[in-house]
Amino acid sequence: MTGPKDLDPSSRRIMIGEELHHARERAGLTQQALGELLFVSGSYVGQMEAGTRRILPDMAHKLDEILGAGGFFVRHCTKANRSKHPEHFAEAAEAEAIAIEIRQYESLLIPGLLQTPDYAREVFLAYQPTATEEVIDKLVAARTERAHLLDDPTKPLLWAVLDEAVLRRQVGSPAVMAEALRHVADLARKRRVMVQVLPFTAGAHASMNGPLKLMHFDDAPPLAFIEASGVGQLMDDPATVARHHLSYDLLRATAHTPKQSLALIASVAEDYAHEDHEPEA
């Protein structure tokens, strides 16, 4: 089985997942039984079949052997695992692309899906101050391309809780911040995204260790993703995902309402715009 050469990685993974599903059933194996042979959970197998998880090279070899696939998975998974995104984030970005619902908490940055190109550029320059313009341009282009997920008027559902620090930490010039926050506010006004701000006055909260992303899918179990500098972990263990869901629910309960949050974001954006136009002393 071969797919069109112009398939993007996410689409290619879905195609491979469908083949895995058929090959597993031909072999008379349940997801749990195949998972035991691969030393992973049955839900992990289900996520590979749905295209939400990568089939890594060593697992591709095992699948070809167990399912008698004649090298299919080794051949195709190499192409499917290519990504424009940093390695630690690539699998999460590809899962995000087919999620029907994304719930996210950010402690310091505007979420990638909500960033403007100028804001993203400032972030990448801070991460890689010695990188060439070509490298930075590619990173910005990949992040901007991700944001096209929101071009669909209804899905995925995106619900973001932003720490107040996201609004107050100036990334780039005041003009960059004003544009970035106005963009978030515009998406909220259009009811394309739900946004809440977790104020400093909330004090200690359920996700002080850092950002959190939860993703739900039509035909696969939910995933949780946590990220630090240069590292990321995508988790599918039901108990772990449920624990992170509780943390997110606690954050939403503590944050300003969407209406209060929109007013605050718009107000801070105007403060930055005013600062940008103040005459120099």
Image: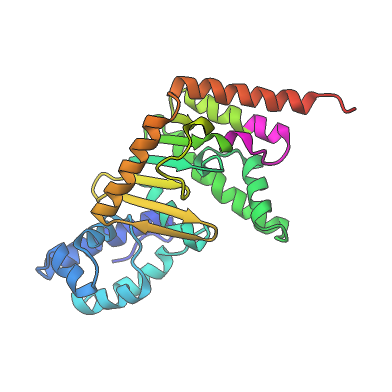
Indicate yes or no whether the magenta region holds residue 175: yes
Q: Which quarter of the figure is the C terminus placed in?
A: top right
Image height of 236 relative to 257, above or below: below
Question: Residue 230: which quarter of the image?
Answer: bottom right
Q: Residue at x 43, y 40 (%)?
A: 205
Percent across and percent down for residue 141 are 59, 49
Can residue 251 be spotted in the picture?
yes
Can residue 222 be spotted in the picture?
no
Q: Residue furthest right?
A: 281
Image height of 67 relative to 108, above or below: below
Q: Residue furthest left?
A: 28
Q: Residue at x 38, y 59 (%)?
A: 4
Indicate left or right for 136 with 213 as reference.
Answer: right
Image height of 137 relative to 102, above or below: below
Question: Residue 178: which quarter of the image?
Answer: top right
* Secondary structure, magenta segment, majority class: helix
- Report the magenta residues as a range: 166-179
Q: Residue at x 44, y 41 (%)?
A: 105
Indicate left or right for 262 with 75 as reference.
Answer: right
Indicate yes or no whether the magenta region holds residue 230: no
Q: Which quarter of the figure is the N terminus placed in?
A: bottom left
Q: Residue at x 40, y 46 (%)?
A: 213
Residue placed most toward the observer, 249 or 270 = 249
Percent across and percent down for residue 189 are 49, 21
Percent across and percent down for residue 84 are 52, 58
